[in-house]
């Protein structure tokens, strides 16, 4: 593993969630007005629950934080209960004192998706760049919705989801036919510009892709492998996800 990567292996998902939340809370305390990148998916759910607990118990203050989410389905209505907008409100933002005007999530309702993507990049730059980006890994190694084969040089843009991602995300929808075919996602370059990254990975099903990402060749075929080139990556995994690491 690359020396710039710091890895914590926790016993189980509960411990992983606590560890990741504590590490992230430390970042917020160090820089309350920092810029923070959030992720969706099932992996960060436990971490978000823990952050809410820390907010309530120790008054972890989010009021000055600026947030940018990695991605959003396209097209999708914000009010749709499968939108990442809805996900973030339900699972985190409604339960902490984040300032609504500081929250950024790509707009799945945008009439001009290309200009939405360009504006998203500009807003990140105007905010001073992301201090710490939370990341999960898709079953095929995707980060955000950067699917295998996408360029490492890509900025925020509209992408076509792979069949694997559509199938994998269909568990949240009534049927695979209901899953949007496209998404707006930060590009790999956007993610790599973040000053630090907090990667979380859980479960046996992710063990092989987790090993490939951390220890395999750096290739767009495994988008998460690009993180080996990032100067400051902190990784929290559970034993199952880490079980195939050398
Ligand atoms: C979606 C998100 C990714 C996330 C991935 C993994 O595809 N766009 O950002 O990392 O799901 O999801 P899970 O954590 O449920 O395995």
Image (cartoon, helix red, strand yellow):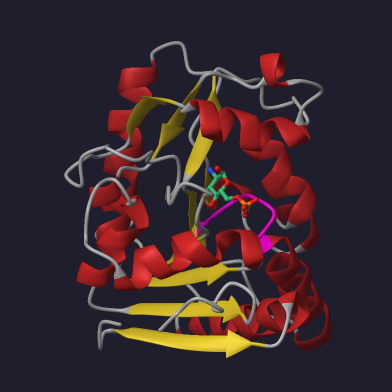
Nearest the viewer among 29 and 217 is 217
Q: Is residue 157 magenta?
A: no
Nearest the viewer among 103 and 220 is 220
Residue 71 showing in the rendered view? yes
On the rendered structure, is 114 left or right of 200?
left
Q: Quadrant of the N terminus?
A: bottom left
- Residue stretch rendered in magenta on the structure: 38-44
The image position of residue 35, as x and y in percent, is 42, 64
Identify the residue at horizontal 42%, vertical 70% (top origin): 211
Identify the residue at horizontal 52%, vertical 50% (top origin): 138
Vertical placement of residue 89 versus 180, above or below: below
Q: Which residue is situated farthest in the top direction here?
A: 111
The image position of residue 65, as x and y in percent, is 52, 65
Q: Is residue 39 magenta?
A: yes
Vertical placement of residue 143 versus 239, above or below: above
Nearest the viewer among 220 and 227 is 220
Please identify the quarter of the rendering in which residue 156 is found: top left
């Amino acid at each position: 593993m690359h020396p710039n990567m710091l890895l914590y292996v926790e016993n189980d998902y509960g411990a992983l969630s606590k560890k990741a939340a504590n590490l992230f809370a430390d970042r917020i305390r160090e820089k309350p007005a920092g810029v923070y990148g959030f992720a969706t998916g099932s992996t960060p759910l436990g971490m978000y629950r823990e952050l809410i607990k820390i907010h309530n118990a120790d008054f972890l203050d989010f009021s000055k934080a600026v947030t940018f989410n990695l991605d959003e389905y396209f097209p999708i209505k914000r009010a749709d209960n499968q939108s990442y907008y809805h996900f973030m409100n339900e699972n985190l933002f409604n339960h902490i004192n984040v300032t609504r005007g500081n929250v950024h999530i790509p707009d799945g309702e945008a009439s001009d998706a290309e200009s939405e993507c360009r504006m998203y990049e500009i807003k990140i730059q105007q905010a001073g760049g992301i201090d710490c980006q939370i990341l999960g890994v898709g079953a095929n190694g995707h980060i955000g919705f950067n699917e295998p084969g996408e360029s490492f040089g890509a900025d925020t843009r509209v992408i076509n989801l792979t069949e694997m991602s559509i199938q994998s995300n269909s568990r949240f929808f009534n049927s695979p036919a209901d899953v949007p075919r496209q998404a707006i996602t930060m590009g790999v370059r956007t993610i790599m510009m973040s000053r630090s990254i907090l990667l979380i990975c859980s479960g046996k099903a992710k063990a092989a892709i987790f090993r490939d990402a951390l220890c395999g060749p750096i290739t767009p075929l495994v988008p998460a492998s690009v993180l080996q080139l990032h100067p400051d990556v902190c990784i929290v995994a559970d034993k199952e996800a880490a079980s195939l690491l050398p």
